[in-house]
């Protein structure tokens, strides 16, 4: 009996040893796994912070490059007069100029930046952090060189406040016990976070790591890794505390790295908690221990999966901007190359068939159509840019909404007929026909909707339109509904939610060969937002679509003004129909352009309508010609903007300032490839009467002559 008890005791001891060994192995395994996961967690958080800064730098470098291209479109003198003393993008972007002229005025700017840029030969880069000599704040800068044509060195410089940037990479995990630095390859701290422990390091990261507390070889390895801009982690004793260092290099034109520091005790706290609970319950039965281990393991695995999922979502969001940019460039490349291919191809065919007049005429017609198609792409992009930048200003005119509706119907009948589509317009029966609005933008919205319906409706289909007015009137405003229904290909359900976003097109449009960058509906939506209107769509694939536009207009009770406008419009229309009454043979028209091909095209267009032209190759020649000719000699001047010697703005100002009777009255029309709203405004501020955007067509030229030459 005694031996039996001894045997049981031995078996119990063996079972206890096995259980203890299992607990020990389990504890060690859990400890290693938690440590690995903690390091990965810290590393991923740090990489997200570094990636966010990389994306911000890339975006800001891109903006500076765009601004640089805009600056180089004007002459150096204008650039230095306008840009040097001012902030040109936002309050943190400045133009630094280095002019060889000893009398040139030097704007008060950050001395450290000026001193660095004066010595550097880089085209772009990042300046280390320093104290701004003007504000006293800790800052750092990025810069892009601007090569002025006169040899002056210029730099676009964006300033970042260290305290603002540090908020973007503050470590929120481990109960905010971690913090990060931005350092250069020598360990010098460029940006420090707003953290209670970050001030332990005064100037250099390696000051935080004492050689007497750590292995010198490990410090050397860490220093070499930082200098070599490598990724990794290391553990050191700092002021008696074990600290974990993770480091990751930045990508953008710099020698900087992000270094995150977390006390090891914080990382191991979770491990110690689990191990403590494991030791407390190690004396229980194996089954209970296994259940508890399985339970806690399940929690850990679930938390790990959730955290990894959050990391994947964060990475996808970080890459979204790059993917959107790539998608935009892909659409642009396809939709611009298509008409360019037609233009180049038809030109080759025409050259190869010079003796076949019919074939040449066919090629020229297709070249003209492709050119107009390409211009429409550019116009759409300009409209999108102006809408997104808030540069579109609506006119407030008294107009007849029913007249605009009828004009649009008459205009769209021809493209519908050419596509073998039946137009079914309903008569407009309105309680109030006269409203206050912008007739050009109202007409553009209606045309965009109908054009879209015609484009996506197969041959033999129908497009129905109607204009109605809601009986409800509030605060003097009426609601007008424009409805367009087609029997076209319809819209996929997944596209309905994002069809008014820029550059979105359905898959079936690609397969059907329908061209377009996908901005038409986005432009329409943007215009309606500005006009306080709305747009909605109902559609089903292969059964057609219905677009409903709601306009909100101020009602105009006095319709006499609209009647007068209609009479004037009709008179102008009747006059333009009788083109034979215009005779320009005795008129002198001055063409000012530095590109010979542009001059040749304009001469040919003017000859087509019976007008003759004299030429000037730059603004100075134009000023000299006007000054030497008798008063009233020139009936009109077509003025280019970007030219050598003297640009169109300065030439116009000098002509307007001449002491002669016709200086203020001679029509000067801007003829320029600068077609943004600010370009039109700048032309008028310089004294020009009107603006025509290149490429030019005979229609706008003829209309301009009819308007300004009496």
Image (cartoon, helix red, strand yellow):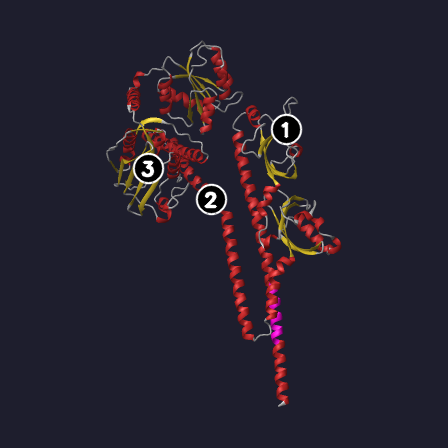
Residue 571, disc:
none
Front residue (pair 508, 245):
245
Q: Nearer the viewer, mark 1 or mark 2?
A: 1
SS category of the residue bearing label 2: helix
- Residue at the right extreme? 212
The secondary structure making up most of the magenta span is helix
Residue 562, quarter of the rendered image: top left
**Residue drawn at (60%, 46%), measured in percent from left and top?**
250
Residue 550, disc:
3
Q: Cα distance, mark 3 to mark 1?
A: 53 Å
Q: Which residue is mark 1?
A: 108
- Residue at the bottom extreme? 1
Magenta extent: 18-32
Mark 2 and mark 1 in contact (Cβ < 8 Å)? no
Q: Cα distance, mark 1 to mark 2?
A: 40 Å
Residue 320 location (% of width, % of height): 48, 46
Residue 95, quarter of the rendered image: top right
**Image position of 37 with respect to 101: above or below:** below
Which comes sooner in the sequence, label 3 or label 1? 1
**Image position of 128 with respect to 308: above or below:** above
Mark 1 and mark 3 in contact (Cβ < 8 Å)? no
Mark 2 and mark 3 in contact (Cβ < 8 Å)? no
Q: Which residue is mark 2?
A: 324
Question: The N terminus appears in which quarter of the rendering?
Answer: bottom right
Q: Is residue 349 visible?
A: no
Q: Cα distance, mark 3 to mark 2?
A: 30 Å
* Horizontal relation, residue 104 to residue 557: left or right: right
């Amino acid at each position: 009996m005694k031996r039996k008890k001894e045997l049981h005791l031995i078996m119990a001891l063996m079972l206890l040893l096995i259980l203890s060994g299992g607990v020990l192995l389990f504890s060690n395994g859990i400890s290693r796994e938690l440590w690995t996961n903690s390091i990965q967690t810290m590393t991923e958080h740090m990489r997200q912070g570094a990636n966010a800064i990389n994306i911000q730098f890339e975006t800001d470098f891109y903006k500076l490059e765009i601004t640089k291209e805009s600056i180089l479109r004007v002459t150096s003198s204008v650039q230095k007069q306008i840009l040097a003393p001012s902030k040109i993008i936002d309050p943190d972007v400045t133009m630094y100029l280095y002019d060889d002229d000893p009398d040139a005025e030097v704007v008060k700017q950050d001395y450290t930046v000026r001193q660095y840029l004066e010595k550097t030969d880089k085209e772009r880069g990042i300046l280390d952090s320093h104290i701004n000599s003007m504000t006293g704040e800790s800052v750092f800068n990025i810069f892009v060189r601007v090569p002025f044509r006169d040899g002056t060195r210029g730099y676009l410089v964006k300033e970042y406040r260290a305290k603002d940037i540090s908020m973007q990479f503050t470590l929120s995990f481990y109960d905010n016990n971690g913090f990060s630095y931005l350092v250069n390859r020598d360990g010098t701290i460029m940006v420090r976070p707003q953290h209670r422990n970050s001030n332990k390091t005064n100037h250099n990261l390696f000051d935080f790591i004492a050689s007497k507390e750590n292995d010198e070889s490990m410090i050397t390895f860490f220093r070499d890794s930082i200098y070599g801009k490598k990724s990794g982690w290391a553990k050191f004793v700092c002021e008696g505390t074990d600290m974990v260092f993770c480091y990751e290099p930045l990508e953008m034109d710099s020698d900087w790295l992000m270094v995150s520091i977390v006390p090891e005790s914080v990382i191991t706290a979770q491990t110690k908690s689990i191990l403590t609970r494991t030791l407390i319950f190690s004396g229980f039965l194996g089954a209970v221990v296994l259940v508890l281990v399985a339970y806690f393991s399940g929690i850990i695995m679930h938390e790990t999966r959730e955290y990894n999922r959050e990391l994947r979502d964060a990475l996808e969001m970080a890459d979204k901007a790059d993917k959107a940019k790539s998608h935009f460039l892909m659409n642009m490349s396809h939709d611009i190359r298509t008409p360019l291919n037609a233009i180049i191809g038809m030109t080759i065919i025409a050259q190869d068939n010079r003796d076949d007049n019919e074939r040449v005429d066919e090629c020229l017609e297709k070249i003209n159509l492709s050119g107009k198609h390409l211009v429409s792409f550019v116009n759409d992009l300009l409209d999108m840019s102006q809408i997104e930048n808030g540069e579109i200003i609506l006119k407030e005119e008294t107009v007849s909404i029913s007249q605009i509706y009828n004009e649009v119907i008459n205009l769209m009948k021809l493209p519908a007929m050419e596509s073998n589509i039946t137009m079914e317009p309903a008569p407009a029966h309105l309680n109030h026909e006269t409203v206050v609005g912008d007739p050009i933008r109202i007409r553009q919205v209606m045309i965009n909707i109908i054009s879209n319906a015609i484009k996506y409706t197969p041959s033999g289909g129908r497009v129905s339109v109607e204009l109605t007015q809601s009986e409800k009137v509030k605060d003097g405003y009426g609601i007008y509904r424009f409805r367009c229904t087609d029997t076209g290909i319809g819209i996929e359900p997944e596209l309905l939610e994002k069809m008014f976003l820029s550059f979105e097109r359905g898959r079936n449009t690609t397969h059907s060969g329908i061209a377009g960058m996908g901005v038409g509906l986005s432009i329409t939506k943007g215009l309606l937002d500005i006009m306080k209107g709305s747009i909605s769509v109902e559609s089903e694939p292969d059964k057609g679509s219905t677009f409903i536009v709601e306009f909100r207009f101020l009602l105009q009770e006095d319709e006499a003004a609209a009647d007068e406008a209609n009479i004037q419009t009709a008179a102008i229309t009747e006059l333009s129909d009788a083109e034979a009454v215009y005779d320009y043979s005795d008129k002198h028209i001055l063409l000012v352009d530095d590109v010979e091909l542009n001059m040749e095209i304009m001469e040919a267009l003017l000859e087509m309508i019976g007008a003759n032209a004299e030429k000037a190759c730059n603004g100075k020649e134009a000023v000299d010609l006007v000054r030497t000719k008798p008063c009233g000699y020139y009936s009109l001047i077509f003025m280019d903007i970007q030219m050598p010697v003297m640009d169109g703005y300065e030439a116009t100002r000098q002509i307007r300032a001449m002491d002669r009777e016709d200086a203020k009255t001679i029509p000067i029309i801007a003829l320029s490839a600068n077609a943004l709203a600010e370009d039109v405004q700048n032309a008028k501020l310089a004294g020009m009467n009107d603006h025509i955007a290149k490429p030019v067509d005979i229609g706008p030229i003829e209309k301009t002559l009819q308007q300004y030459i009496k």
